[in-house]
Amino acid sequence: MLELSNYNTRDLLWLGDWSLGWVIALGLLGLSVLLFSAYDLRDMRLHRRLTLLGLRASVFSLAVIMLLEPALDLKQVSRVKNHVAVLVDTSQTMSLNVAGEKQRRIDRARKALEDLRPTFEAHHEDHHFDIFTYGDTLTPTTLEAALTTEADATQADLSAALQALPDHYRGKDLGGVIVLSDGIDTGAIGRRVRRGEDLDDASKEILSSLRAPVHTLAADADAGMRDAAISRVRHDDFAFVHNSITVEVDLFFSGIEPQPVPVTLRRDGEILQSQSVQIDPEERRYTVQFEFVPRQIGKEVYTVEVPHFEDEALLENNTEHFVLRVIRDKVRVLQVVGRPSWDQRFLRQLLKRNPNVDLISFFILRTDDTPQLVPRDEMSLIPFPTDELFNSELGSFDLVIFQNFNFGPYNMARYLPAIADYVRQGGAFAMLGGDLSFASGGYARTPIESLLPVELPPAGPGQTITHSEHFSPHLTEAGDRHPITQLAFDPAQNRELWEALPQLQGTNIVTGPSEGATVLATHPTLTYGGQPMPVIAVAERGEGRVLAVTSDSTWRWGFEHLADGGTPREYQMFWNSAIRWLIQDPELKLVRLDVHADIAAPNTPIDATARVFNSDYSPAANASGKVHVSHRPLEQRSDDTTPPQPTRTLDFQTDASGEHALDLSFEEPGIYHMEVEVEGAGGALRDENLVLVTPNVAQLRDIVPRNALLERIAEHTEGHHTLLPELNPTRLDFNPPRFVEIHQRRVVQLWDSALLFLIVLGLLAAEWSLRRRWGRL
């Protein structure tokens, strides 16, 4: 027997496979039959006619109902709880104190969570309350865990958290969202909607996709907050040396009295520029620009800072550090020539044909001792710009070449110390031979001699100390391996190429290599102190490099080789390699230290790779080396002579590809210098790099709460907004559950009934009987 009490919902179903068109057709057919019957029975009394029409209509209606196959759908169902997402902001700004109080924002959020516990329990029959924390990502958690979670996330991406909810609840029913936050959103909505603006269409679309009310509980208000912050520093990842670069700094001031505020840019701790911003009480955001010219290649650490103010909510956001990679745009070369020559011509053509070289050449065509046949103002020759080249513009050159040039006639003695300083600070200098060069040019006992990789004999005024015989230079053991004299990777083939070069004609006399110099080639017959006289020598002076070529006839390697059916390849390789070595081209290094991130937070992994190459630049497998790490505080100025503090030394061995991955992390903020050292055949090979370790305070660049943004979010989704600690849980309404779960179901077919069939037969019999009695067939 059917127990209807076991079911709590009843629905009428039509099981017949009849389309709407057929149902309408049956209805029209029945109406037509009734109209025809009414016309046929028009002569009968009214009550008899209506009785017969009623019986016929009942029979037809029951027949149609049986064709449609009605059934009763009985179900026992219960509503499925929907989900309410509770989002707790755990970003770094939530760890700050509420304005004017000692309570933290996260503590207010925790108190609100505790106050909502009865609400969660009271609505447990209709809703599942799912607790999440969000910052960098949306993370499910429990109520108890959320009450103890610290606010340390480096992002406050409320937008991403809201966008993740539809996917998280795919196939489920989301009944509402509760957000406990200070309103600071580092995501899409926060970036698009500025303070004081309404929600844009894209933000509204994100919120509408939830199809649920979003209730926002603000942990703090924006009134009363006092803070000066560097919001953002915009700069290119790299800059070109000797080219201007612009750095834009966005500033945010809240609660700061009208006054001029200095904004300072430092490079390696030393003040580079400073600008002033006048605070306007009606304006919070400001932008300043710094424009400067980097002078050195490599990584430089820059700092932008504003002063600290009394009672500031946070001081860490008053400073921003960044690393700028300075690279070459073109190699800027200054070529100074004492008099035109074939050597000068060939070298100048080589430099001019190189698209990566920006060449400035000066040729001395006349001196003050040259007889003047016409007045000076009628000459087209310009005076030698000594002061401009060797004072104001010297630092803009990557390489300075003195080619058969004597400084005496041009009153340059006072500029020679500047050239020496230029080299020791990272510049490059090359001196080429000739009767006006080396000792013959008067460079003995000058600051230039202290740079040169060769010692000079003393020479009297106008005295020429040269040797004019032809010779073929002999490579030294160091010359076999050095990139300047490496015309081929194979040592035997390299010597064959050098022996096949055309002979040089003449050389300046030098007295041997200077301290710290490396001799690459020597004279076959000339000696000094029993040792072969250097012809090609190099040295590192401070941070710069120098080259000495005592002959002025290397052009023969290019010219006479062509006459013999060869190519100028060897001449070009020699000078191109010399220039690359002098300017310290990283591609020539046999040891390289690559750091994959310039900036890292304390205690975070830093990926670095040491790469070692053989002299032919093939990977050096199983090469052993060391990495020396030292630390320098961020506050230390670049001119501070205090050496960086060594922190550790790491031993390593390369793999088959000549590489070794270094896993590093540093606890203390600062600048960490890393130097890799590998013993090679010619001595120690080194490379260095640096990484800036500083706390990630990007999320603290804007700490002023955005109560208005939370209010607009709640308003658009028909949710409730309140400023904590005020909280009325009864104002938090959620969508009722939309899904049900069927526990029991039965379909009772009403048309498949003998009683219904008998009723139809009875109606037909009654209609036939009455029709016969009333005289109708």
Image (tube, rainbow, N blue to C red):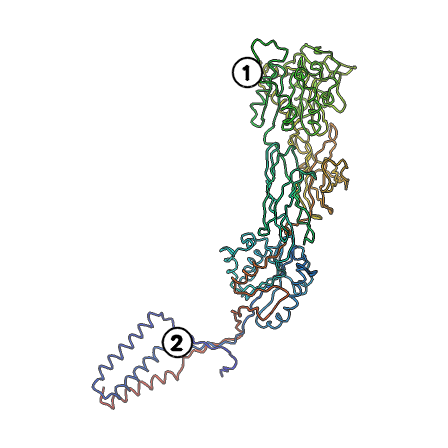
Amino acid marked by disc 1: Ser
Amino acid marked by disc 2: Glu
Compare residues 114 and 59 and report the one nearer the observer.
114
Residue at 65% from the left image edge and 64% from the top image edge: 142
Find residue 76 and report its horizontal and vertical position in percent: 52, 76
Residue at 72% from the left image edge and 27% from the top image edge: 541
Separation of residues labelled 2 and 1 (CA atoms): 114 Å
Q: Quadrant of residue 753?
A: bottom left
- Marks 1 and 2: in contact by CB < 8 Å? no
Label 1: how many Cα within 10 Å (few below 14, some 14–19, many 20+): few
Residue 434, visible in the rendered structure: yes
Q: Quadrant of residue 140?
A: bottom right
Compare residues 254 and 629 and report the one nearer the observer.
254
Q: Label 1: which residue?
A: 380
Q: Quadrant of residue 764?
A: bottom left
Name the residue furthest front. Answer: 258
Find residue 569 and report its horizontal and vertical position in percent: 59, 21
Residue 596, visible in the rendered structure: no
Task: In the rendered view, tell whether residue 204 sits above or below residue 741.
Answer: above
Residue 69 is tagged as 2
Find residue 469 and report its horizontal and vertical position in percent: 68, 9
